[in-house]
């Protein structure tokens, strides 16, 4: 059976089951029907023996026989008490050699067939008057048995043929979705990751397999697209800093000897672009990781009140350069659960943007609250604001508003922030008006009290 297909195995087992069931059915039928027929014949001849009794009279020591009505098939002989046959509805010598067993029914084989005999005693006023032997051939029993055997011999091959046909159809129908899955897998192997198994949605095992397969393809396609996107973004975004680095290195390595200050300037450029590339790469890697990022997170209890305050302090110098005032309105003891490194990065991005895109002499308001099981962080500035058409895109990778192109950045900060908040099961939203400023609002689940 090793080389058999599932379809062949299913058909075989189906056929075998049907044949076994048919055999069991016939055995049961044979085992219960034939004894019932024999019992019926026995009861009939016993009843007939009883019916014959009253018709036999003893007249002065001689037996007399009135007319009697008994079953057509029953043969009988009436004997004198000495065992001499007196009357019979056929030859008198019928079964005379068979020993007489009083008031008993027994089976004998004679003249090539089975018989059932019943020997009854006829008593008158307490005296034995006669014996009556009734009997019938078991021909009908034998006929039924051989008919059953014949039916059995026809039914088995016919049943097997029907089972083979039906089994094949059932196997074909139930394995059809598997063929569809195989076909789809084949197409996917040839490079079409967008293909899905199109089967009617069923709740059976194959339906579950098909939907699990489609879900697996969804994740594969997402991962594959992300990978492709990452490679194309990386090569695109790294091209400019690499060109600058190569340019600076070429100038420094040229034949012409340069003043030392120019070498230093070239090295500074190379270093700065190198650091930019490093930051960008680590940000892109974080964004490119899908579900794996969840596994890499180091979850601890984070005191958001301390974290936001500490980060804000780190930005005081940067804000001072633009004469931006940072105002803090922080509720104490707001705790969340999360990855400290990632959360620090998200809060830093928001505050950094607030200052970077803030106006000279402006302000930045940072509010932290912990109402209704949520930690709410608001970072509001009165800076340049974001154009309405830019708002839907600012969380996209590498998106930078037109006005922002002159400032430092790579357009990855907000998409990274959004991803981090999402990894912490929170949400981020923005409200902004050009020349009035922007409000970024982050909501995170509070750490549940122990
Ligand atoms: P980057 O700051 O490196 O350009 P981000 O992803 O942090 O990248 O931001 C994307 C874009 O969203 C920015 O280029 C800018 O146009 C806009 N933006 C983000 N934060 C602010 C803000 N506080 N005020 C005005 N514009 C902002």
Image (cartoon, rainbow, N blue to C red):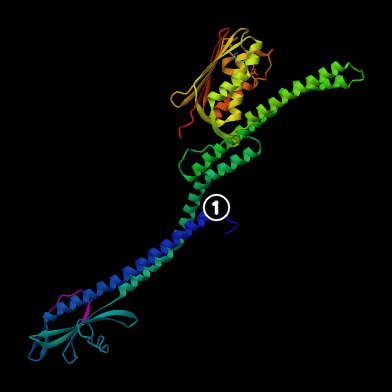
The quadrant the N terminus occupies is bottom right
The magenta span reads 67-76
Q: Residues within 10 Å of mark 1 (few under 14, many from 20)?
A: few
Q: Is residue 42 above or below residue 132?
A: above
Q: Is residue 124 above or below residue 139?
A: below
The image quadrant that residue 116 belongs to is bottom left
The image quadrant that residue 288 belongs to is top right
Q: Position of residue 284 (x, y in %)?
A: 66, 27
From this viewpoint, is residue 352 visible?
yes
From this viewpoint, is residue 402 visible?
no
Q: Which residue is mark 1?
A: 6
Q: Position of residue 406 (x, y in %)?
A: 69, 12
Q: Residue at x 47, y 52 (%)?
A: 166
Residue 99 appears left or right of 67? right
Q: Position of residue 107 (x, y in %)?
A: 29, 80
Residue 92 appears left or right of 373? left
Residue 378 appears left or right of 101? right
Q: Is residue 379 above or below residue 18?
A: above
Q: Main secondary structure of the magenta part?
A: loop
Q: Nearer the viewer, residue 330 or 65?
A: 330
Is residue 190 part of the magenta span, yes or no? no
Q: Residue at x 45, y 27 (%)?
A: 373
Q: Residue at x 55, y 40 (%)?
A: 213
């Amino acid at each position: 059976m090793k080389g058999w297909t599932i379809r062949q195995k299913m058909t075989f087992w189906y056929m075998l089951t049907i044949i076994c069931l048919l055999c069991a059915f016939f055995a049961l039928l044979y085992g219960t029907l034939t004894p019932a027929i024999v019992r019926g014949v026995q009861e009939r001849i016993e009843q007939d023996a009883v019916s014959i009794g009253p018709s036999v009279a003893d007249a002065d020591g001689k037996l007399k026989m009135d007319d009697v009505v008994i079953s057509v098939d029953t043969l009988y002989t009436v004997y004198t008490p000495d065992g001499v046959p007196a009357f019979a509805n056929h030859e008198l010598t019928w079964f005379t050699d068979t020993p007489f067993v009083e008031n008993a029914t027994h089976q004998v084989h004679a003249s090539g067939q089975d018989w059932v005999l019943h020997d009854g005693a006829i008593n008158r006023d307490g005296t034995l008057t006669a014996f009556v032997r009734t009997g019938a051939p078991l021909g009908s029993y034998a006929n039924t048995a051989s008919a059953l055997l014949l039916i059995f011999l026809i039914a088995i091959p016919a049943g097997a043929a029907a089972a083979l046909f039906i089994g094949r159809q059932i196997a074909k129908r139930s394995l059809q979705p598997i063929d569809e899955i195989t076909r789809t897998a084949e197409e996917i192997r040839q490079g079409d990751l967008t293909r899905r198994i199109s089967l009617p949605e069923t709740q059976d095992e194959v339906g579950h397999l098909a939907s699990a397969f489609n879900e697996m393809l969804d994740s594969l396609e997402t991962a594959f697209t992300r990978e492709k996107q990452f490679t194309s973004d990386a090569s695109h975004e790294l091209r400019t800093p690499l060109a600058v680095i190569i340019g600076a290195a070429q100038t420094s390595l040229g034949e012409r000897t340069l003043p030392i200050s120019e070498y230093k300037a070239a090295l500074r450029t190379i270093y700065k672009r190198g650091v930019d590339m490093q930051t960008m790469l680590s940000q892109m890697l974080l964004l490119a990781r899908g579900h794996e990022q969840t596994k890499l997170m180091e979850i601890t209890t984070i005191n958001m009140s301390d974290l936001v305050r500490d980060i804000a302090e780190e930005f005081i110098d940067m804000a001072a350069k633009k004469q931006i005032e940072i105002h803090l309105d922080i509720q104490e003891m707001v705790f969340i659960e999360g990855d400290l490194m990632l959360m620090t990065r998200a809060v830093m991005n928001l505050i950094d943007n607030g200052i970077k895109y803030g106006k000279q002499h402006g302000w930045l308001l940072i509010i932290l609250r912990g109402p209704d099981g949520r930690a709410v962080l608001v970072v509001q500035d009165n800076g340049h604001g974001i154009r309405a058409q830019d708002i839907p895109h600012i969380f996209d990778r590498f998106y930078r508003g037109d006005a922002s192109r002159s400032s430092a950045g790579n357009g990855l900060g907000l998409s990274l922030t959004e991803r981090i908040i999402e990894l912490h099961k929170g949400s981020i939203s923005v409200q902004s008006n050009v020349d009035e400023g922007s409000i970024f609002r982050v909501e995170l689940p509070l750490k549940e009290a122990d």
